[in-house]
Image (spheres, rainbow, N blue to C red):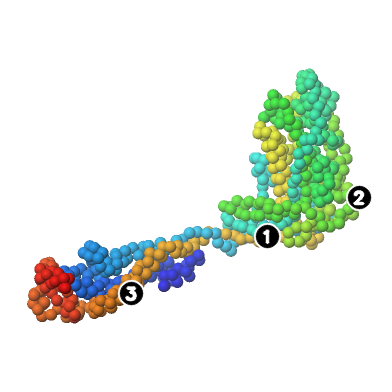
Amino acid sequence: MPIVAVLGSYNNNALPKLPLHISLNTLIAFLATLAKAALMIPIAESISQWKWNWFRTGRNLVDFQTFDLASRGLWGSVSLIGKTRWRNIATVGAAVTIIGIVTSPITQQTVSYPERPASSNGTATTWAARHIGDSSGQPYTEFLRMVDSIHASLGPNAVDSYVDLEPECSTAECSFPSFPTIGMCAKIANATSLLNVTVLSNASLSDMTGWGDGTNVDTRMVAYNITAPQVGAWVTIPVAYTMNFFALNESFYFRDNRDLRYTTLYDSLIIYSNGPNISYPNNDMTVVPNFQAAEVILHLCVKTLDVKVSKGKAVTTTSNEQAHIISDVPQEPIFKHDCVSWDITGEVTPFICDYVPLQTVSPYTLVLDGPGGNFSVHSKLLAEVTVDMHQGLTTFWNWNGRGSSAETGGDVGMKLINAVWGTKDGLEAQYERIKQVADSIAIGGTNMMRTMQPFKGVANSYTIEGTAWASETYVHVRWGWLAFLGAQIAICIVFLVFTIVATHMSGAMVLKSSPLAALMALGRTERDGLGNLGTETDMKQRASAYQAALVGSELVITPRALGQQLTRAESAV
């Protein structure tokens, strides 16, 4: 039917623009009205035919008008049902006529207009890096961005406030396919078993490792010296360093991992405790410190990223990380550093360590396996990034025993301090927050690599095209609402077929709504008995006094008393 064809053509499509600015609901209402009108013709004719079938036996003459009105509209249909009390099949047609008044409103409920994201012609672009070449002759300022990227990724307020690389998105909603890129990953291992703790029960400041003779504190206290098997790896509590974050020359826990050894950009050991730290606002001198250590490695890897923009906010998640070298490598990584000197002098002088990449092998290209092909980085870039990371991540938190403190390393140091001492929620939470800091540093490094400029014509940054979405109103057809109209059509067909069959089997003439049949069915005797035309009330009163029956081709009218006697007599026979 036309309604189904129209709805099917527009279903799940954008809101149409119809001629003369009419709406789809208006079109559906028009088609529903046509369908209703088409239904009423066979319904009316069938009810009219049942009028003649009704008078195959003696009936009240006034019923003739009741059937005739039922074939014409709502009120007559109600009267017919009330008169016959559902004892005649014509009441089915009358019921369809009554419920037809809600056909159009119900049919219009078939169409709804929800909203959905739809592809627009806007911009959706983000970046990835596949090959980073030799950096010789390139401006060094490009690599200085690594420090800025690391600090930016840490965010200003909380440990987990990381800054993702914002894609270009011309709308508030953008999506991108998953894509691989050269990036930075973080690994962390619990290194507490490496620590050696010495308790000094009646110590002065001069007894504590790491302080020069120029510092004098008369107070005697319980102190702790904590060391690890690395030059300069120590923490003194409560008045010296309460956390130490320093670079390693060789991994404690990942040294047998070849892929990790040649992709490492920064390897560090963090020694910390749950307190006390008298130079930090949240210190609690009553806490017996539980010393912990974590080895953190930041290394080159291939990341698979998922980027999306929702409500104007970009979110980047990592669905896969891998660091599998498929190229030849030298005996020693070119970007392994030498720590030239540790200088501990003066009251609060921090360690001074110069990081110089080893130059014992020729430059090489490190090739990593990854989704969709190979990824590569030139060793000179790795060397320079390693230097930048050591300079950017060096941090100390010092107290000089006289009420003043100093902190170096900027955001990194404060983030680690907040991770360790910002709350009092336990050692596991401290460890997880340190891991969060390491992950955020890796995000900053990845962001920097994804946006580096090409070197010597070697393609580095390539764009990932996504889809910019805009809200779109579309047509959704709820087919269930058409069941009402479909039921009407089915009932109408069954009613019409049943009327035809019943009329044929009864032998009644097919007269339907013919006005000539009503005029010519009356014989002269019946006309004389009924009298002439009068008012509506007068004719009803007179008709109520007579009974009628269709005998052959003539409507025989008799007074009701006689008609009832004849009917009983016919029944007896």
Q: Position of residue 562 (x, y in %)?
A: 10, 70
Whichever of callouts 2 and 3 sits on the residue coming sooner in the sequence is 2
What secondary structure is marked by label 2?
loop
Q: Position of residue 293 (x, y in %)?
A: 77, 36
What secondary structure is marked by label 3?
helix
The kind of residue on which mark 3 rests is: Val
The kind of residue on which mark 1 rests is: Ile
Q: Position of residue 19 (x, y in %)?
A: 43, 71
Q: Nearer the viewer, mark 2 or mark 3?
A: 3
Foreground residue among 440 and 250:
250
Foreground residue among 130 and 521:
521
Disc 2 to disc 3, how far (Cα)? 100 Å
The residue sitting at 86% across, 41% down in the picture is 339
Residue carrying label 1: 464
Check residue 429 in the rendering and tell me which mark sits there, or answer none.
none
Number of other residues with Cα within 10 Å of mark 2, as a class: few under 14, some 14 to 19, many 20 or more? few
The residue sitting at 79% across, 41% down in the picture is 268
Residue carrying label 3: 497
Residue carrying label 2: 360
Q: Is residue 348 visible?
A: no
Q: Position of residue 173 (x, y in %)?
A: 58, 56
Discs 1, 3 touching: Cβ within 8 Å: no
Whichever of callouts 1 and 3 sits on the residue coming sooner in the sequence is 1
Discs 1, 2 touching: Cβ within 8 Å: no
Instruction: Indicate the quadrant containing the C terminus: top left, top right, bottom left or bottom right.
Output: bottom left
Q: Quadrant of residue 530?
A: bottom left
